[in-house]
Image (cartoon, rainbow, N blue to C red):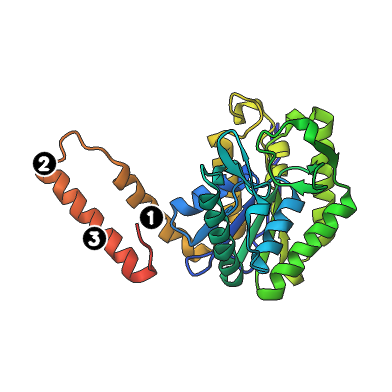
């Protein structure tokens, strides 16, 4: 008897290796993929404006980055002794307005350069629910614990999401025509919106994505959501909050991502990097022993070799 389903996956062309550059933008699940890519020392960056859940917030970041928006005092506000920007996650918030503006404008310039240079852009959509700040009649990327009565909440339609994703692709390809754009939907369930509302949100995201993916235009879809929902159909693959995938689930989804998107030539290098990472994490009982000093020398030689042959630094 079969107690699990396995989603059929095919290798994509234009795969990721140690010569490519990757930028990840989107929900907290994109951070999980970023952390693994970073662990294996791929050329990767993630979420310059912090975690963003909805497609309109991601579209705004990309539009502002490509057009090199200059953030000013009109774009920020103070709350609870911190300065915030509705376009960015609270991770970027600062104790002074000058610090926040400097951070925002530096991040915009960095993102502009990255969008020009990367070979792969991975966008993880988390929710189709958005919040509109009533005072300015504008959608926000993060509410920063501003009282909820100051926002209107609504669900983006499939057409609105489709238009946003089309705009993202057009904007990015206007400066980087050969880029590969990979869309995925976060398997994290947004149950604060409600059980039915979360499923409706994910359905809108999935429908819109599948209306625009086109491999001939280098627009792809990776089924993170389906792997979690249909392959790992068990609460043992969730954290204690029953919402976020646990380490086992994240590792499993990463293994599927590797099958599809990591070039076979990169995988032997990944094994070398993994061995070095484990060596660096090793804590000896007595670091002054001759045996440990020999271990450190051998480890340093491996690091030097990877640096010389593949330009990988630790």
Of residue 61 and residue 254, the one placed in the foreground of this image is 61
Neighbour class for label 3 at 10 Å: few (<14), some, many (≥20)? few
Neighbour class for label 2 at 10 Å: few (<14), some, many (≥20)? few
* Residue 299 visible in the current orientation: yes
- In the image, is residue 78 above or below residue 209? above
Q: Find out whether the residues at labels 1 and 2 contact each other: C-beta distance under 8 Å.
A: no
Q: CA distance from mark 1 to mark 3?
A: 13 Å
Quadrant location of the N terminus in the rendered image? top right
* Residue 177 visible in the current orientation: no
Of residue 39 and residue 10, the one placed in the foreground of this image is 39
Q: Quadrant of residue 202?
A: top right
Query: Of helix, strand and loop, which one carries label 3?
Result: helix
**Residue at 67% in and 33% down:** 145
Q: Position of residue 15 (x, y in %)?
A: 59, 65
Q: Find out whether the residues at labels 1 and 3 contact each other: C-beta distance under 8 Å.
A: no
* Dot 2 or dot 3, earlier in sequence: 2
Q: Position of residue 105 (x, y in %)?
A: 57, 60
Q: Position of residue 34 (x, y in %)?
A: 54, 51
Q: Which residue is mark 1?
A: 273
Query: Of helix, strand and loop, which one carries label 2?
Result: loop
**Residue at 63% in and 58% down:** 71
Q: Position of residue 240 (x, y in %)?
A: 59, 24
Q: CA distance from mark 1 to mark 2?
A: 25 Å
- In the image, is residue 136 above or below residue 218? above
**Residue at 88% in and 50% down:** 158
Of residue 128 and residue 226, the one placed in the foreground of this image is 128
Query: Residue 289 bears which disc, if any?
Result: 2
* Dot 1 or dot 3, earlier in sequence: 1
Q: CA distance from mark 2 to mark 3?
A: 19 Å
Q: Specify whether 238 is left or right of 233.
A: left
Neighbour class for label 1 at 10 Å: few (<14), some, many (≥20)? many
Q: Which residue is mark 3?
A: 301
């Amino acid at each position: 008897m079969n107690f699990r389903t396995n989603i059929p996956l095919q290798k994509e062309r234009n795969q990721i290796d140690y010569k490519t550059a990757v930028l990840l933008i989107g929900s907290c699940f994109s951070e999980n993929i970023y952390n693994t890519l970073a662990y294996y020392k791929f050329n990767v960056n993630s979420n310059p404006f912090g975690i963003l859940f909805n497609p309109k917030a991601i579209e705004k970041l990309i539009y502002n980055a490509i057009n090199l928006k200059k953030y000013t005092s009109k774009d920020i506000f103070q709350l609870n002794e911190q300065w915030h920007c509705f376009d960015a996650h609270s991770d970027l918030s600062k104790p002074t307005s000058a610090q926040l503006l400097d951070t925002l404008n530096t991040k915009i310039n960095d993102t502009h350069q990255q969008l020009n240079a990367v070979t792969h852009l991975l966008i993880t959509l988390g929710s189709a629910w958005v919040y509109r700040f009533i005072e300015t009649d504008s959608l926000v990327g993060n509410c920063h614990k501003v009282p909820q009565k100051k926002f209107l909440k609504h669900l983006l339609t499939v057409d609105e999401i489709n238009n946003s994703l089309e705009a993202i692709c057009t904007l990015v390809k206007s400066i980087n025509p050969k880029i590969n754009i990979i869309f995925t939907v976060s398997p994290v369930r947004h149950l604060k919106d409600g059980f039915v509302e979360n499923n409706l949100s994910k359905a809108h995201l999935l429908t819109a994505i599948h209306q625009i993916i086109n491999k001939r235009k280098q627009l792809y879809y990776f089924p993170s959501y389906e792997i979690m929902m249909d392959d790992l159909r068990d609460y043992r693959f969730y954290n204690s909050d029953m919402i976020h995938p646990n380490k086992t689930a994240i590792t499993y989804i990463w293994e599927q991502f590797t099958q599809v998107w990591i070039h076979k030539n990169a995988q032997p290098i990944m094994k070398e990097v993994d061995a070095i990472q484990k060596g660096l994490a090793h804590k000896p009982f007595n670091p002054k022993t001759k045996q440990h000093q020999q271990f450190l020398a051998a480890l340093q030689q491996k690091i030097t070799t990877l640096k010389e042959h593949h330009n990988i630094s630790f």
